[in-house]
Every structure is written in C-alpha cells, then in structure tokens.
Image: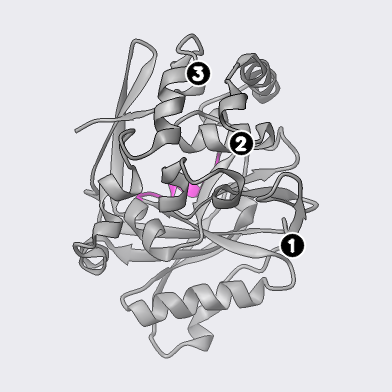
Amino acid sequence: MYRIVNDFEKHTSFGSKQELIKLACGNEVKAYEILSIHEIIQFIGYAKYRNKSIGNVYFRGQTDLYGGNMIPSLFRNVKNIPKVQSSFSRSIKSVKLDYRRIETFDRAILEPILQHYGLKTPWIDVVDNIWVALWFALHESKSIIINNREYVHYYDSRQEYAYIVLMASDATTAVEPHGVYEGKQTTVVDLRKGTPSFFVRPHAQHAYMIKKNELLDADYSDLIVGIIKIPTSLGQKWIGESDFLKLNSLFPSPHFDSGYKYLLKHYPETVSAKNYGSIQILSD
C-alpha cells in the first residue's frame, strides 16, 4: 500500500551506503547511511513525495531497529494480545479525571495524551520535526518503578548509529475532536491540535500518535517506508547546543507544564505501572 523508499540512490548524487533490513511484516527496507544535512532533507522529501497520494509521512527517532519490529508499548513482550487489549480498555475506562477543570480536553484523545506522558497504549509516538526525531535517535533511556511510579533517565546514546524511521499513514480525513484524522488502515492524532497548550510537552516535541484501526494487529512495521542511518557522533554534531533540543525543553518540568502537573496529581497510582506504565517522572 505505502511506497517504500528503496531506490533513493537513483535520485541523488550523494552515493549513500545501504543496508537491507527485513521487517517483521516481511517487507524489506533499505537503511541509507546519510552523512549530509542536504541529503537527509532530500530523502525525507522523496519519501513524502512518493506517498503524497496515499497519506502523510512522519518520523520516529530510535537508537536501534529492534530486529525490524515496530510494536506499540502495550503489546511488547505479550503473548495474549486480545486479553491485554481487553484488560487495558477496562483500565482506561476506570480512570476518572476531573475533565470539568480542563474545558478543551476531549476524552477521545485520552489514550494518546496519556501515552505521551508515559502510559503503555496501542499507539506509536511519531513527530513531524526531523530535529526532534534526531534527538530521540541520539538518546537512550532506562527506568525504574518505585511505588507504582516510573522514573525515567535519559542519557547520550552509546550506540554507533542513530536511526530515523519514516512511517506512513493514510489518516487524512479530519474528524471530531479537532486534531484526530482517520483513514482505512490508521488513525492519527496531532496532539498540538488535540490538547490545549498548558500541556506543554506535546507542543515542544511536535508530537503525533499513530494507531492501526485493527486493534489486535500488534505489528506496525508495514507502515515503515524509509530508514535513515546516521553515525551517532555526526548526529550529535548536528544537534549542537540548541536550547530547543535540550532535555528540559523537550520534557518541561511540572513547574512549566501545567498539564503534566495535573496528570501527576490526578492520575491514579492504583493502575499497575508494570503492566500499563504510569505518568513518568524524569530523573537525573
């Protein structure tokens, strides 16, 4: 359905090295080693142009390709997906937040916004800003659960390469609430339109969420249309020292992010952080 970028070398003079990656869905996608900002822009433009009649292309920064898998956090290391999906749905329905205090917050985007702040859901995080995607490709994380809260630590990647995965979606029809788009195969939420700006993090990260409409399909690798491979040391040079791309800018503290503060205060700690995640707390 989507048009994979496997012929980029025919349309550029840069001469990128390529590595063939076998995805979980069975597709084969070339990972192009890119060493130039001009080439990365051209690659993204080509992927978007090739898929222009189908939908939109978004970016996801990763430090690893995970064997060609693209699995939502809720379904990772899970054998019985229907059982987990059913249990998760009951858990979400049991969450009671005082929506009267957030007049413009629509319950239809509850899962995406909770995912963005740390919960495990059937959604995949993506962005439409290449520099934000590159930041995530250059940073690893580890976490620990204490008293049913997850504490997350980000640090500079120790991997040789950083990866930017391009994912396509056919969700282009705007539906209610604002910021939600639907297609035959996928649904996309633009969190900048779907959530008011006192939820600062999604606006800082240019955040989107993608979900397959077939809820029990745990493999999203068939949405991958391109892979960019960048030496980590080069990516770090490109990022530089911009204040826009520092941890405290992309993950504002509750002092600046009122929505984050609200979720930390009101999201019930009784929901299992081990099974479903929690509103994450960033730690040094």
Q: Position of residue 193 (x, y in %)?
A: 59, 51
Q: Report the amino acid beneath label 3.
A: Asn
Q: Position of residue 88 (x, y in %)?
A: 63, 20
> What secondary structure is marked by label 1?
loop
* Of the pair 85 and 247, the residue shown nearer to us: 247
Q: Residue 1 carries which label?
A: 1
Residue at the disc numbered 3: 275
Q: Which quadrant holds the C terminus?
A: top left
Residue at the disc numbered 2: 105
Q: Where is residue 16 in the image (x, y as percent from the top left)?
A: 39, 78
Q: Are marks 2 and 3 in contact (CB under 8 Å)?
A: no
Q: Is 46 above or below relative to 183? A: below
Horizontal arrangement in the rendering, residue 148 relative to residue 81 (left or right): left
Closer to the N terminus: mark 2 or mark 3? 2
Task: Tell me the residue at 70%/19% (across/down).
Answer: 86
Q: Is 142 above or below relative to 36? A: above
User: Which of pointers 2 and 1 indicates the residue nearer the eye?
Assistant: 2
Q: Report the amino acid beneath label 2.
A: Phe
Residue 87 visible at all: yes
Q: Is 214 above or below relative to 267? A: below
Provide the residue span drawn in magenta: 63-71
Whole-angstrom CA distance, mark 3 to mark 1, is 33 Å
Q: How crowded is mark 3: few (under 14 residues within 10 Å), some or many (20 or more)?
A: some
Q: Report the amino acid beneath label 1.
A: Met
Q: For residue 224, what is the image quadrant?
A: bottom right
Residue 279 visible at all: no
